[in-house]
Image (cartoon, rainbow, N blue to C red):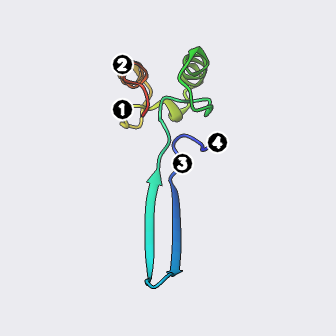
Amino acid sequence: PLDPGVDYRWTGFAYATNDVSGSSYVSFEYDGCPCDLDGNEALNVDDIDEFVTAFLAGDLVVDFDGNGTINVDDIDAFVDCFTAGCA
């Protein structure tokens, strides 16, 4: 599984020769789902537990509003993310 909060980039190159030749380049980034804190690609109570543990420890991994501090605004942002779900 991909780790949340980690930028991934995959680059591929393809070349075909069936009366047609050419190449194709594709690039994309996957940031994971920021509120899937346990990285299992599902939102569940384990992610809430991870959030609470990290919040109480002052771990910036739960700085969901990105202001460099851990406070009640991060709880609100996490709840918003969690309830919106991950696509």
Against 4, is 72 above or below?
A: above
- Determine which residue is flagged by label 1: 65
Residue lying at 56% horizontally and 26% vertically, measured from the top left: 42
Of marks 2 and 3, the one in the foreground? 3
Label 2 CA crowd tier, 10 Å (few <14, some 14–19, many 20+) = few
Q: Residue at x 42, y 34 (%)?
A: 87
* Label 2 sits on residue: 76
At mark 2, the secondary structure is: helix
Identify the secondary structure beneath mark 4: loop
Secondary structure at numbered mark 3:
loop
Instruction: Tell me the kind of residue under disc 4.
Output: Pro
Label 1 and label 3: CA atoms lie apart by 17 Å
Residue 3 in the image: state x and y as whole percent.
Answer: 59, 42
| Residue type (three-letter) at the residue carrying disc 2 | Asp
Q: Hey, which quadrant is residue 28 in on the image?
A: bottom left
Residue at image mark 4: 1
Name the residue nearer the viewer: 2 or 73.
2
